[in-house]
Image (cartoon, rainbow, N blue to C red):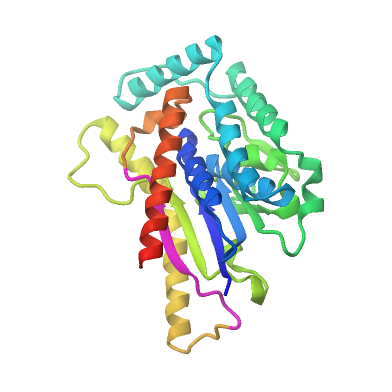
Amino acid sequence: MTTNIAIACQGGGSHTAFTAGVLEHLFENWDDEHELVGISGTSGGAFNALAAWYGLVTGDEAKAAALVNSIWKDLAAKEYSDKLANAWFQTYQRLQNAGFPVAQISPYQNPGSELGKEKIAEILERHIEFDDIPGYCRRTAPELVVGTVDINAGVFDTFVNEDVTVEAVLASAAVPSLFKAVEVDGNLHWDGLFSQNPPVKDLLHQPPDRKPDELWVIQINPQELEGEPKTLEEIADRRNELSGNISLNQELRFVEQVNQWIDDGKLSPDDFSQPEIHRIQMGKRYDYSTKTDRSPEFIDELLDRGRSQAAAFLTQRDSS
């Protein structure tokens, strides 16, 4: 019997290279007993969700694994000028988090902001034929969901399947302090980290034969913390982790509540999904400032950690 799987990829800047490593290992070890029925992502997680989905619908699991890796290899700062800019920004972020008085520059006053956005778009379009996406949105294809915030309407927003454009993906990653808002369908959008991080609800609204049996959440932000954050840097780190997890935990608690109502006979399993929830976590805490670190060494470290955590997850799951 085939097990339907949905995967939700949390956002978190460069840290989501970890997710690419997770997906790479999962797809390299995929078998016919599992079917991916949906994948969602926010911010950097949207890059991964899109790459995995596109690799699957245009090829197979091997292509999906290769594509998520290739995109992050291209996003890494390899050129000399890019390395200098990356190193400078890391220093700036650390000074800011430590409470030093540093100049605050709006992305609307920083020409480098648009250059950064254009580079991301160029890399995505190098690997993804966005104009072809609607043609691959068949009933048997996994659901693709990208999360953003509509800052004009003041609501969460998701782009699903054929509505996923390069602008939608850029909007999902448009951190307000770094990038200008991205216009999509007449409204301005910001980073989806403020909303569903990552989207879950859309993954569950599937036809009866496509409802997920399991939901695998690839979680970037640490859930728990021992001790008390006291320095400004520690406080900034924990605030960021909590803000990234609040919406996720709210959605997962609602899923668990629906599962309980189904078990209690209050809801029909024919009308609602009842997935088991599994989390694949990074297992290591990194400073908030490193969420913008694109050094090749750091990206490789995160990819390796993703592969090892995915291997541990599969081993544990198969033994339970």
Residue 275 shown in magenta: yes
Q: Residue at x 72, y 33 (%)?
A: 125
Q: Quadrant of residue 248?
A: bottom left
Res. 150 in view: no
Residue located farthest toward the bottom when viewing the structure as drawn: 265
- Give the magenta range: 270-283
Res. 49 in view: yes
The quarter of the image holding the N terminus is bottom right
**Which x, y percent locates residue 66?**
60, 39
Q: Residue at x 71, y 30 (%)?
A: 126
**Which x, y percent locates residue 206?**
65, 69
Q: Residue at x 74, y 47 (%)?
A: 58
Is residue 80 shown above or below 257? above
Q: Is residue 119 left or right of residue 307?
A: right
**Which x, y percent locates residue 247?**
45, 55
Q: Is residue 252 left or right of residue 153?
A: left
